[in-house]
Image (cartoon, helix red, strand yellow):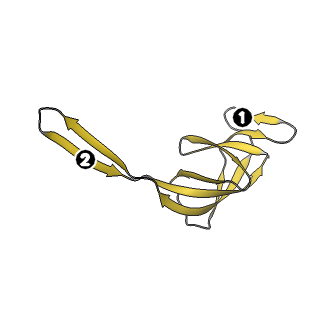
Amino acid sequence: MYAVIKTGGKQYQVSEGDVIQVDLMKGQPGDTVEIDDVLMLKTDSDVKVGTPVVPGAKVSATIVDHVKGKKIIVFKFKRRKDYRRKLGHRQKYTKLRIESIQAG
């Protein structure tokens, strides 16, 4: 059984026991989060596709940790104008462990 969920403007295919990394969510490590935006649900016998979400379906997950991603460098440059700007950025992520998928 697996589901396709939407969180942070992105879609993820998850099944029970998976650990996924999503955009930063509120909460402390150990807290339980319920995601109601289930776009598709596949069980052993059938497939339910939502319009846009599957009614009554939800995914329960536990926050494992808050982490930072790899550092990226943003460099702006205009030739012959003596203009250079160098910035760095590290995106913050939340690791979630998928505990259960309810079909509703």
What residue is pinned by disc 1?
Answer: 50
| Foreground residue among 36 and 66 | 66
**Is 5 placed left or right of 22 in the picture?**
right
Residue 53 visible to an observer of this rendering = yes
Q: Residue at x 75, y 40 (%)?
A: 41
Can you tell which mark lies on residue 91? none
Q: Residue at x 18, y 34 (%)?
A: 78
Horizontal and vertical percent position of residue 103: 79, 46
Q: Is residue 53 above or below residue 96?
A: above
Horizontal and vertical percent position of residue 55: 74, 40
Q: Amino acid at mark 1?
A: Gly
Tell me if mark 2 has few (under 14), some (14-19) or many (20+) residues whose alpha carbon lies within 10 angstroms of its own: few
How many numbered dots are placed on residues in this image? 2
| Foreground residue among 97 and 70 | 70
- Quadrant position of the N terminus in the picture: top right
Residue 25 visible to an observer of this rendering = no
Horizontal and vertical percent position of residue 33: 63, 58
Q: Earlier in the sequence, mark 1 or mark 2?
A: 1
**Is 60 placed left or right of 11 in the picture?**
right
Horizontal and vertical percent position of residue 72: 37, 48
Which is more foreground, mark 1 or mark 2? 2
Q: Amino acid at mark 2?
A: Lys
Task: Say which element carries label 2.
Answer: strand
Q: Residue at x 72, y 43 (%)?
A: 3
What residue is pinned by disc 2?
Answer: 86
Q: Quadrant of residue 46?
A: top right
